[in-house]
Image (tube, grey):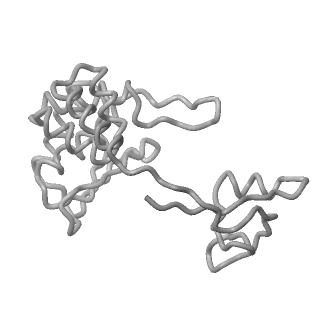
Amino acid sequence: MTPPTWARDLVRIVCAADAVDEPRLAWRSRAGEHSTGVTRRQDGSIAVRAGTDITDQRLTLLHELAHWLAPAPARSRRRRTQHHGREFYAVAFGLYRRHGIADADALRLESARYRSALGHAHELGIAGARDALEAHRAVLRARPRRRWRVLVDEHRIRLERDGRWTVCATCGQKVVGITLARIRRARRPVSHTLMTSAS
C-alpha cells in the first residue's frame, strides 16, 4: 500500500536534515497494536508493517531511520553485529525528541522491543530512563528462581531430520545455527544433556 503522507514527509525531513539520500519506503498494515520495521541499506529501502497505535507507527519509522543514519555497526571478535548499541540509540533518541515522541513513550515502546534500550537511554541521560531501568531490575529480582533438573541424561548427539529441522535423535531437541555447524565439523562425538526448569 502507499505510505501515508506524514510518513513520506518524515522521511524527507529527516534525510534532508542529515543531507543523506532518502530510502524507498514500503508500507503495509498489520492487525496488532504494535508496528515492526526493517532497514535494508543494501537495497536502499525501509519497510514498515504498521499496527494500530499511531505513536508506535511514528516511533517505528524513526527507529528505522536511525538505522539509516547511524554508522554501520562494527562486528565483534565473535563476528556478531550489535545493531542496537550506544551509537545507534544516540541517533534514535535524538530523532524521537526532534520529531515529537515524548521520552516516556520512547522508553516504553523501545524497551518493549529491546530491554537493552533502557541501559543505553540511562547512559545517554534520557529523562525517566533511570527509574524505568530500576523498575525493570526490580521485576527481574522479584521473579521466582528456577529449579533445574535433568530431563534426559548426557548423551551423544546424533543428528537427524524432523521435517524442516535438524534434531538430536535421542532427545528430539532442535539443533540450529552455530551449534549445528560446530557439531557437523566436530571430529569427535559431541554430547549434551537436556534440562528442564520449573519456577
Q: Position of residue 41 (x, y in %)?
A: 42, 41
Name the residue at 66% across, 78% down: 162
Question: Where is the N terminus found, in terms of image quarters?
Answer: bottom left
Between 174 and 36, the one nearer to me in the picture:
174
Measured along the vertical axis of the image, is residue 141 above or below residue 130? below
**Residue that extends furthest to the bottom in the rendered view of this protein:** 163
Picture quadrant of residue 76: top right
Picture quadrant of residue 32: bottom left
Q: In the visual, does 10 lie left or right of 180?
A: left
Name the residue at 90% across, 53% down: 187
Q: Position of residue 55 (x, y in %)?
A: 12, 47
Question: Where is the C terminus found, in terms of image quarters?
Answer: bottom left
Between 171 and 119, the one nearer to me in the picture:
171
Between 80 and 112, the one nearer to me in the picture:
112
Name the residue at 23% across, 29% down: 93
Picture quadrant of residue 31: bottom left
Q: In the visual, does 159 lie left or right of 125?
A: right
Q: Please state the total of marks drawn on the protein image.
A: 0
Q: In the visual, does 163 lie left or right of 27?
A: right
Between 14 and 90, the one nearer to me in the picture:
90
Measured along the vertical axis of the image, is residue 115 above or below residue 196? above
Q: Position of residue 20 (x, y in %)?
A: 31, 29
Q: Position of residue 147 (x, y in %)?
A: 51, 55
Measured along the vertical axis of the image, is residue 136 above or below residue 4? above
